[in-house]
Image (cartoon, grey):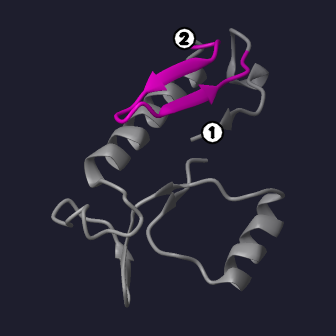
Amino acid sequence: MLPIKIHVLHPEDKSLLERELGGVLRAVEFIYKEPGVNKPLTADDDEKKNLNGKKYRIQINKVSNAIDEVIRTLMGVLTTPVDRKIPHGQSSTITYITKAGSLDHIQPAMIAF
């Protein structure tokens, strides 16, 4: 599962979701915020006005890297941790625990951003 967040959740909704998931929701955020505004982030939004400081192209890149690595893991190609460098010196480490072979042998994976 690769959660994508497009708006700020109400606290009770977030609590319900985390209770059902059995842990903290860690999602790639596509949220644009400025005073009085809470909407999905778009390519046309001004990152200087965005209080979240998120850039659309960076968030798209995070999602595409995560999808690529999930697919490679399911195919048994990727079996070791991967460190992806993203702009501004931030690092996004995605750790997979897999065994080569069929999908029956794949253990749960943690995706950390």
Question: Residue beneath label 2, please?
Answer: 77
Gap between marks 1 and 2 measured at Cα: 19 Å
Judge left or right: residue 87 versus residue 25: left
Front one among 58 and 1: 58
Task: Name the quadrant containing residue 77.
Answer: top right
Residue most extreme to the left: 44
Residue at 69 percent of width and 9 percent of height: 100
Amino acid type indicated by mark 1? Ala
Query: Secondary structure under badge 1?
Result: loop
The residue tagged with tag 2: helix, strand or loop? loop
From the viewer's perspective, is 21 left or right of 11?
right
Residue 112: quadrant of the picture: top right
Q: Nearer the viewer, residue 28 or 69?
A: 28
- Is residue 6 on the magenta stretch? no
Determine crowd level at label 1: few under 14, some 14-19, many 20+ residues with C-alpha closer than 10 A: few
Q: Residue at x 77, y 20 (%)?
A: 105
Residue under numbered circle 1: 112
- In magenta, the rendered stretch is 77-98
Q: Confirm or deny contact between disc 1 and disc 2 (CB under 8 A).
A: no
Q: Is residue 32 above or below residue 63?
A: below
Residue placed at 67% from the left, 24% from the top?
96
Label 2 amino acid?
A: Val
Residue shown at the point (52%, 76%) measured from the top left:
8
On screen, 56 above or below 83? below
